[in-house]
Amino acid sequence: MKIKQIGQIAIPVHDSNRAIDFYSNKLGLKLLFQAGQLTFFECGDVRLLLAPPEKENQEFYGSIIYYQVDDIHQAYESLYQKGVMFLDQPHLIAKMHGKETWMVFFKDSEGNTLSLMSEFENKEV
């Protein structure tokens, strides 16, 4: 057996309507379909699943999803103008193999931590 790629990521939500608005109108992801309380978005080759907890009082645990963008500064400014709550500003994480990796972290409408990331050619190499 060999794992090829990630096919889907589930994101916990408290308020489905608020989360759908955030992912479609703020992040601009394409809504694929809804099935009951489950909502699916397209993000490249990966589906994002927005889902409430299966049981009442279930803890919410989410992974940080890193959305790759071409220009982190432009993406940051665009989302900031839409009212997205950022935890920091775009900053350099690492210089490796002739590239710079930049990230910025933000919260979605449900309190999940997410990130934008960009990789640029390092001009100092």
Image (cartoon, rainbow, N blue to C red):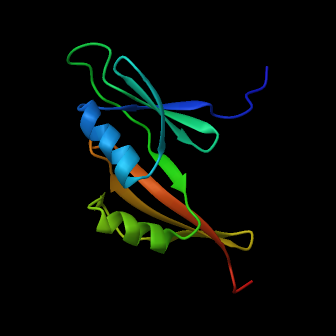
For residue 91, say whether it is visible: no
Q: Residue 64: where, in percent of width, then height?
A: 44, 44
Q: Residue furthest right?
A: 1
Quadrant in which the C terminus appears: bottom right
For residue 9, say whether it is visible: yes
Residue appearing at x 61%, y 45% in the figure: 44
The answer to whether 9 appears left or right of 17 in the picture is right
Instruction: Give 98 or 13, whichever is nearer the viewer.
Output: 13
Residue appearing at x 32%, y 15% in the figure: 54
Q: Residue 46: where, in percent of width, then height?
A: 59, 37
Q: Residue 5: where, in percent of width, then height?
A: 69, 34
User: Quadrant location of residue 36?
Assistant: top left
Compared with residue 72, is residue 125 higher up or lower down, i.e. above or below? below
The answer to whether 48 appears left or right of 1 in the picture is left
Compared with residue 9, is residue 77 higher up or lower down, i.e. above or below? below
Instruction: Give 115 or 35, whichever is nearer the viewer.
Output: 35
Q: Residue 114: where, in percent of width, then height?
A: 41, 50
Compared with residue 101, is residue 114 higher up or lower down, i.e. above or below? above
Instruction: Give 44 or 117, whichever is nearer the viewer.
Output: 44
